[in-house]
Image (cartoon, helix red, strand yellow):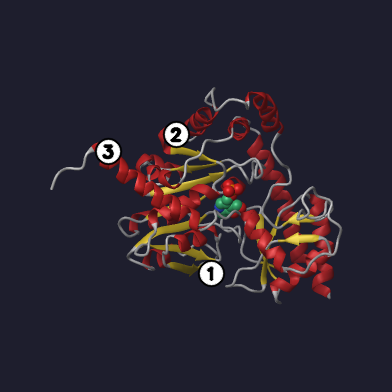
Amino acid sequence: MSKPTSDEQALGRRSFLRGAAFLAAAAPILTEAQLAHAAQAAAAPTGLALHGQSPNAPPADMVLINANENPLGPSKAACDAIARIAPLGGRYDRYGETEMLVRTFAAQNGLKPENVAAYAGSSEPLHYAVLAFTSPTRSFITADPSYEAGMYAAKTSQAKVIKVPLTADHAHDVKAMVAADPNAGVIYICNPNNPTGTLTTKQDIVWALENKPAGAIVLVDEAYIHLADTADALDLVAAGKDLIVLRTFSKIYGMAGIRCGFAVARPDLLAKLTPFGQNAMPITASAAARASLEDAALIPARKKLIGDVRRDTFAWLKANNYKVIGEPQSNCFMIDTGRDGKAVIAAMKARNVMIGRTWPIWPNAVRVSVGTPEEMAKFKTAFKAVMSA
Ligand code: PLP
């Protein structure tokens, strides 16, 4: 048989790209906003007038603690960086904003720039990682409850989805996850976990890496890592392990609408994601993200602010005999309401407070995001009224 010519090889690559594009088109890349919106659409309508520019926008006075957003928004430095770079928006990324962002993050974390790929949010690399490493013969292993976007992506690759309940202390049950399928493709660990805000130890993540099936990757989603007192997994990337770490600027950095995130991994693992999509970054997002990284005071200040509101809310819930699940260290937590969670969500919405969704494994538990002190005061009033009804 003759050796393929370079044209044929290029053609082969193109047809692979077409296949990948077809797969990626088969299901949308789901974000928290879409998952949160779907849950609210199922809840009772408010009957309130809409103030937003879109007829689908929630009323301006609605308390939005349903999508784990950061009400503090982008930092002043990030907004200034956007204002500075916006006039250059007529050009592509001529000054290398995205490269500088990647270099900054890599240098801050003892990584090489080739370990870091920037995307418009972490939903995109999450989706692509699942498409790249799962298939009809390589399954997707996730905790239950956990963030669902990867599970939906696994439907596109026609992979088996195996849900493994959290341990009694609400960590990922890494032993059961690793044992779940010798042909696993992705073991997804969300740390801190969405929706519970609870932690999985670094030791357990290392154990999963050391004991996982050959060929599988551990996908460590660190969307909320800055809010918690726990070690991150970036040193495991530097050590060349089989993991991809996801980071986002949507949470502590308050840039959910501006869109920036990273996949952090060995270059050969990152290369497996690129056939599924690799668009250029908006220079505004790259500039804002770099300004956020360079602001050393930002994370400690926001971690304290959000942590203080969370602790105050927990104290109030406890004093009123409402049950928070586990010991969350994030900007979201679950309350076991002891009744149908979806009905609680609908009743809260009728009182102008949008809280998060339920998960099938715990139909009585609702997720709540940490808002401003004023928003949480409104949450408390509405929640007490709903629970006493
Ligand atoms: N991963 C987790 C665990 C999330 O909760 C979210 C959003 O809420 C994302 C990833 C995706 O965030 P984004 O695409 O805004 O970076």
Q: Position of residue 66 (x, y in %)?
A: 70, 58
| Residue at the spot of label 3 | 7
Spot occupied by residue 191 in the image (x, y as percentages of width and height): 53, 54
User: In the figure, is residue 351 to the left or right of 279?
Assistant: right
Q: Secondary structure at mark 2?
A: loop
Q: Quadrant of residue 240?
A: top left
On the question of residue 49 being in view, the answer is: yes
Mark 3 vs ligand 1: CB under 8 Å? no
Q: Is residue 267 above or below residue 142?
A: above
Mark 2 burial class by Cα count in 10 Å: few <14, some 14-19, many 20+: few
| Quarter of the view holding residue 215 | bottom left
Q: Which residue is mark 2?
A: 110
Tell me the crowding category of disc 1: few under 14, some 14 to 19, or many 20 or more residues within 10 angstroms, Cα based: few
Residue that badge 1 annotates: 168
Q: Nearer the viewer, mark 1 or mark 3?
A: 3
Q: Is residue 184 above or below residue 77?
A: below
Using a 10 Å C-alpha cutoff, classify the residue at mark 3 as few (fewer than 14 neighbours), some (14 to 19) or many (20 or more): few
Position of 287 compared to 136: left or right? right
What count of labels does the image hold?
3
